[in-house]
Amino acid sequence: MLQEFYATVTRILKVPLPPKEVMAFLDRFHAFPLVATDFSLVTEGIRNSVKFQVSFWDGAVIAAAERLKAKTFYSEDLNVGRCCGEVTIVNPFVVSSDP
């Protein structure tokens, strides 16, 4: 995900950020647990993409969330409320009608 973030903010944004500024921002992520993209994450991502009918990248992110024992995954791309294994998808931009 960090590589996707970097590619997006340095190339896809209307006003791209300079790499040095992005590096300073990314330094803050050391405070959070991260999952390395290794062979098992790639293969689990492939399995998830088939099992949940999502893209490889979404399958890999779900695998990373499972590895971290996360119960919630925030995404604006996946189906809200969908469970993928032990992970429930939540769109942070959709207001829930639940009290």
Image (spheres, rainbow, N blue to C red):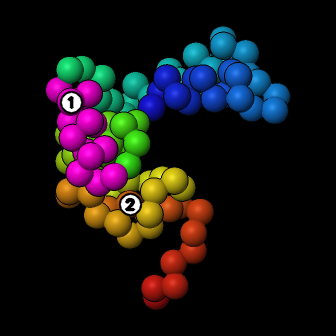
Q: Residues within 10 Å of mark 1 (few under 14, many from 20)?
A: some
Identified by mark 2, the residue type is Ile
Looking at the image, which residue is at 44% across and 67% down? 80
**Mark 1 residue element:** helix
Nearest to the observer: residue 41 or residue 55: 55
Q: Residues within 10 Å of mark 2 (few under 14, many from 20)?
A: many
**Residue 82 spot, x, y in % from top left:** 35, 66
Q: Which residue is mark 2?
A: 89
**Mark 2 residue element:** strand
Residue 20, above or below 67: above
Numbered label attached to residue 43: 1
Q: Main secondary structure of the magenta part?
A: helix
Instruction: Say whether residue 12 is magenta.
Output: no
**Residue 89 spot, x, y in % from top left:** 38, 60
Numbered label attached to residue 85: none
Identified by mark 1, the residue type is Thr
Q: Picture quarter containing residue 71?
A: bottom left
Q: Which residues are magenta?
A: 40-53
